[in-house]
Amino acid sequence: KQEVTQIPAALSVPEGENLVLNCSFTDSAIYNLQWFRQDPGKGLTSLLLIQSSQREQTSGRLNASLDKSSGRSTLYIAASQPGDSATYLCAVRVGNTPLVFGKGTRLSVIA
Amino acid sequence: KAGVTQTPRYLIKTRGQQVTLSCSPISGHRSVSWYQQTPGQGLQFLFEYFSETQRNKGNFPGRFSGRQFSNSRSEMNVSTLELGDSALYLCASRGGDLATDTQYFGPGTRLTVL
């Protein structure tokens, strides 16, 4: 059974700092991995999708990497801003099964 | 392109009642999934529909049911509500390719059971 773990559960950083969020998964036979952002009480916003054949994806200040063999992904946020404060979730898809989510990392960027 | 829409956005019910939530996917998307999100359990998968057929089902009691219509719109029903059903219910849609298609989420329906 696929399990997804995100460490740390919460993170507080000063504005301008570069930071890394971690995601690990137990079954490496994934189709893809997605990173989402969720603001309090809101739905999820898709940030990046990495296919199993890819090593990384970039969007603006965000860069996500994938190492299938070790069951790890990282989300790198450059030059963090207070508007980046949110919960970040990673999710993996294995075959024709639903996305399996981690519990998320709650990020606070302090001005 | 319009995003995933969910109605209603907020709902207050009492124990024993039933509730129906609605989800309209992004135009052209045939897959609709439902998730329950609570502070303690995180995001838990309820079910997925593809072209009006239930493709996957999560580990929830039979009080939770759903369906999908020919226009891909989906409804979720919860009967005999319990206090523990209070949660944010999220709907998501995607296209047909499992490997490459991003899953897009709606804003959710906040259900409170009193």
Image: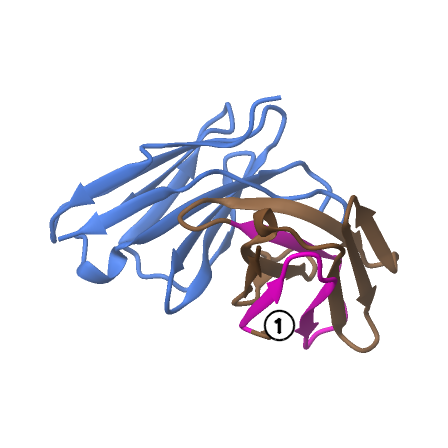
Chain colours: A brown, B blue
**As drawn, B69 above or below A86:** above
**As drawn, B39 above or below A40:** below
Mark 1, residue position: A2
Q: Which residues are magenta?
A: A9-38
Q: Main secondary structure of the magenta part?
A: strand
**As drawn, B33 above or below B95:** below
Q: Measuring from the top left, give residue A94's x and y in whole percent.
A: 69, 62
Q: Is residue B63 left or right of residue B1?
A: left
Residue B64 vs residue A44, the one in the foreground: A44
Q: Measuring from the top left, give residue B61's x and y in whole percent.
A: 31, 61
**As drawn, A103 above or below B80:** below
Residue A33 vs residue A13, the one in the foreground: A13
Q: Name the chain letter of the residue that bears numbered label 1.
A: A
Where on the picture, by quarter, is residue B109?
Answer: top left
Does the magenta segment cover residue A15? Answer: yes
Where on the picture, by quarter, is residue A59?
Answer: top right
Q: How many marks?
A: 1
Does the magenta segment cover residue B56? Answer: no
Q: Amino acid at mark 1?
A: Gln
Residue drawn at the location 44% of the way across and 45% of the way down = A42
Residue drawn at the location 58% of the way across and 62% of the way down = A100
Q: Is residue B16 left or right of residue B56?
A: left
Residue drawn at the location 76% of the way across and 56% of the way down = A78
Q: Is residue B11 left or right of residue B55?
A: left
Q: Residue furthest front?
A: A111
Which quadrant is home to the N terminus of chain B?
Answer: top right
Q: Measuring from the top left, give residue A28's x and y in whole percent.
A: 76, 72
Residue A95 vs residue A3, the one in the foreground: A3
SS type, badge 1 = loop
Q: Measuring from the top left, give residue A32's x and y in whole percent.
A: 74, 56
Neighbourhood count class around disc 1 (C-alpha, 10 Å): few under 14, some 14–19, many 20 upward: some
Q: Is residue B80 left or right of residue A89?
A: left
